Structures are given as structure tokens and as C-alpha cells.
Amino acid sequence: MQAYYYEIPAYLQHTEKEAIICDEQQVGTIQRVYSNGLKKVIDRMFDQKYFVQIDTKIGDFAPVTCKKIQRKGKIYYDAIEEGQSLYRIAYIGWKELIPDLMISNKKEQMTLEMNREGWSPFLYNEKTIARWRADYIEEKDTFRITFEMLEDSPFQNPALFLAIAQAALFIGA
């Protein structure tokens, strides 16, 4: 099982690149990004959650962008892995306090079972293929993110998982 870690400040305005660590070495980055300055200014007025995207790049894997989409009263995410089909991420049980996420690219689908504390597993055919957790470090006002992926996961790009999980943590509903 491959393990990745990073720490990110807990405040939503943070847009600096953060290092993703694996085996004590930096292997990639994750960053909160705005496509233009106007969207960033408008987003400040709307709780920093509407126009932002999460960009993730790990090693030789394709970069991934995940962004929140809000249309006609529906909220979902699009994750774009360079060279792959678009992944659509939608809430399951959106009336629940912490809804799960369904992730689909029209060929395959997986589920992220969100947990407020502890591990949140990514499931494919009802089998855990990866897991993710965010632990708040009060002294530093940061989240320590830990992600582990099984080597036989049908989705091999860890940046895909991290972009989706980070979007769910910081962008939310």
C-alpha cells in the first residue's frame, strides 16, 4: 500500500502550492487555484467555495483538476484527469450531515464514504481500493492529510483521489 501525506492550512483563502510526500520525499503538489482574478474576488464574497478548483500533480501521473459546479440548484464536482474521461462526482444522500460521494466516468464508478473522523474509504465494486483522512492540528491550524492506495486499485493516479478528497474537505456543499 502506497502512502502519501501533506499538510495544508485550515483557512480557505490559502492558495499556495503544498508538497505531497511519499517515502520521505516530495512527489507532487496540491493547490487551490482560481482561473482568473475576478473569480477570486467574487469568491471572497461567497465563503471561498464557489469558483475555486483544486489542482494536483504527482510524479509521472497525469495532472488532475477538480472543481465545484453549481447549476439549476444542483451541486456536483467535475474531476479532469489529463487524457482521461471526465469524472463526475455527485452527493449520495445529500440530506445527511456528511453525505457520501459517487464518482463516475461513464465506464466505471467508485464511492467515497465520507467520515468526519477517521478513515474515509474509496470503494470500487464494494471493495476498499484506497482510503483518506484529514486530521486537524489545532496548534498549527492545519490539516494533516493522509492517503493510502492499494497497489491493485483500478484507478492508479493518486492525484485523482487527492483532488476529489481535498475538494470535498474544503469546498463541500
Image: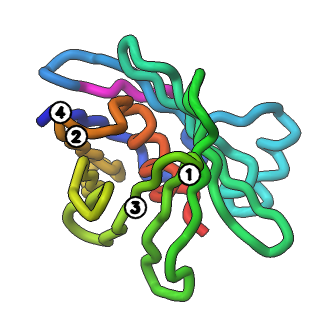
Identify the magenta region: 15-21
Instruction: Please give left or right for residue 121 compared with residue 93 in the image.
Output: left
Picture disc at residue 151: 4
Q: Is disc 4 placed on a helix, strand or loop?
A: loop
Which residue shows up at 26% across the image and 55% down it? 133
Q: CA distance from mark 3 to mark 4?
A: 18 Å
113 drawn magenta: no
Which residue shows up at 32% across the image and 27% down it? 20
- Quadrant in which the N terminus appears: top left
Q: CA distance from mark 4 to mark 2?
A: 6 Å
Work out whether mark 1 precedes mark 2 in sequence or the reverse, and give the earlier one: 1
The residue tagged 2 is: 149
Q: Is residue 35 visible?
A: yes
User: Please, is residue 9 above or below residue 5 in the view?
Assistant: below
Neighbour tally class for label 4: few under 14, some 14-19, many 20 plus, Cα within 10 Å = few
Q: CA distance from mark 3 to mark 2?
A: 14 Å
Neighbour tally class for label 2: few under 14, some 14-19, many 20 plus, Cα within 10 Å = many
Q: Is disc 3 placed on a helix, strand or loop?
A: strand
| Amino acid type at image mark 4 | Glu
- Quadrant in which the C terminus appears: bottom right
Name, please, the residue furthest toward the front. 107
The residue tagged 1 is: 12
Q: Is disc 2 placed on a helix, strand or loop?
A: strand
Taking depth in this image into account, of 153 and 12 the one nearest to the observer is: 153
Picture disc at residue 111: 3
Work out whether mark 3 precedes mark 2 in sequence or the reverse, and give the earlier one: 3
Image quadrant of residue 58? top left
- Of tags 3 and 1, the one toward the viewer is 3
User: Please, is residue 87 above or below residue 103 in the view?
Assistant: above
Q: Is disc 1 placed on a helix, strand or loop?
A: loop
Q: CA distance from mark 1 to mark 2?
A: 26 Å
